[in-house]
Amino acid sequence: MGSSVVVPTGSSGPDTSDESAVAESDAPDGRWWRSAVFYQVYPRSFADSGGDGVGDLGGLLDRLGYLELLGVDALWICPVMRSPMADGGYDVSDPRDIDPLFGDVAVFDEVLAEAHDRGMRVTMDLVPNHTSDRHPWFTAALAAAPGSPERDRYIFRDGRGPGGAEPPNNWPSVFGGPAWTRVTAPDGTPGQWYLHIFAAEQPDLNWENPEVIADFERTMRFWLDRGVDGFRIDVAHGMAKPADLPDMDRVDTRMLVHDDSDPRFNNPGVHDIHRRLRKVLDEYPDAVSIGEVWVDDNARFAEYVRPDELHLAFNFRLAETSFDAAKIRAAVDNSIAAVASVDAVPTWTLSNHDIEREVTRYGGGAAGLRRARAMFLLELALPGAVFLYNGSELGLPNVDDLPEDALRDPVWERSGHTERGRDGCRVPIPWEGRQPPFGFTSAERSWLPIPPQWVGLTVESQLERLDSMVSLCRMAIELRGVRPEFAGTGLEWYGSPAGCLAFRRTGGLICVLNTSPVPTPLPPGEVLLSSVPIEGALLPPDTAAWLV
């Protein structure tokens, strides 16, 4: 084989010697989520119908036609339950009601019905690890005595040192500072400390308390009975805590990372919790659970997607990988291997509301957009479930120069203004028009400012161009859903030159990616779709193509 030619290894075609190749399931269960394309809606940044500059459920309802046009199979709606919004809705004060910022239960029901009529499933975020500090349970806990049933719903402990003035252990909050806050007793004296792995406004629940799991089961049934098709489980690896709450050997204050030695997460008791939750979901045969799981060891990751636990778990390898063919192949191999031992379904995502947008991660500007287009095709070519974050289909970059007075992420305050947080990937969707807020809201300004440079990235302008990112997404999603070459769960690698990769799906689709700086010849076959136009038989740099 010539060093610049992408062709199968050996005379028989695919490189079947690679141990990471996935065997097609002998009896796939055919459930809808196994190969679904999910679209993550970050509600406050999707569309505003109320004129207050903040996206809401009415805005989502108004724009469901766009999502149907895009061709996605399901929505994942980030938290819309009642919340003081200390962490964008991930601090829930009433899990069985809709926050007025987003609307009410009636409009949520309208979203459900309309989405279903348009052929889209609806999943929503649930937050089991913690509540808001304004949840009635926590208010009662603060008013109650140490050792009371009210405090037992959370994790209260006496402090260490003279007078209990030091936190119970050295755990840091993910958002910066200690993971403990001391409360004041009713008589005004310093009292116990409570645990909050995230912000102080998000006290961790005690999942050893039977009231906690019973209430969560009630919440699940409340939404499932309304017609919700499943849940994304926030911090699904975090509910169980070690009984003795030991100190960390190494204090790491970074955001969620793959660190299996962190006692705050991945404790064995979490699996009994997921088994309880799965029993509820099994009462609703088509419902799906999707866990946010940060685990480095594949054997431990697989435990979360055993047949009696989660249906799916997010694997963030691709989102953490640079635009390099060898590293991308390793990430794909790792993600597939992570679920192969339990015959579970791999998941793929390149961005979400916590991660820098892919256009920026891949270099920004025209080069970053070109690479994001290529990676989108690679992601859609892989077997399993795919998750798209709102705005990724438009090729939106991160906005890293937001004014400091516009920042809303609690990371900004908790870090003492040293970390800007995640607002840069949460800037609202530009819909139409020539200037901000680009039809996102009828208000003068959106809750985070939209850059005027996004005038060429609006949905309206992109739908008019066949060469736009959104047009590429529409074509790719449609082909993925109707072409027989995407059938099966198998994937086999082809031999390819440095800086390139190629694989074949069981159904016959070939996907090639060129991350090198030079063009490389395409393998035999008809080009079904490419991330940029291809002339002749060469695959340009920073380009992906599908062949049949």
Image (spheres, rainbow, N blue to C red):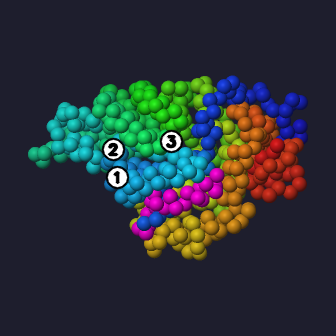
Residue 447 position within the rendered picture, expressed as x and y whole percent measured from the top left: 44, 65
Q: CA distance from mark 1 to mark 3?
A: 22 Å
Q: Nearer the viewer, residue 330 or 16?
A: 16
Answer yes or no: is residue 417 visible.
Answer: no
Q: Secondary structure at mark 2?
A: loop
Per the image, the residue denoted by label 1 is 83
Residue 200 position within the rendered picture, expressed as x and y whole percent measured from the top left: 31, 48
Per the image, the residue denoted by label 3 is 229
Magenta-colored stretch includes residue 201 = no
Q: Secondary structure at mark 3?
A: loop
Q: Amino acid at mark 2?
A: Thr
**Horizontally, is 296 left or right of 447 in the view?**
right
**Horizontally, is 375 left or right of 56 in the view?**
right
User: Comparing marks 3 and 2, which lies closer to the viewer?
Assistant: 3
Q: CA distance from mark 3 to mark 2?
A: 23 Å
Q: Mark number for residue 131? A: 2
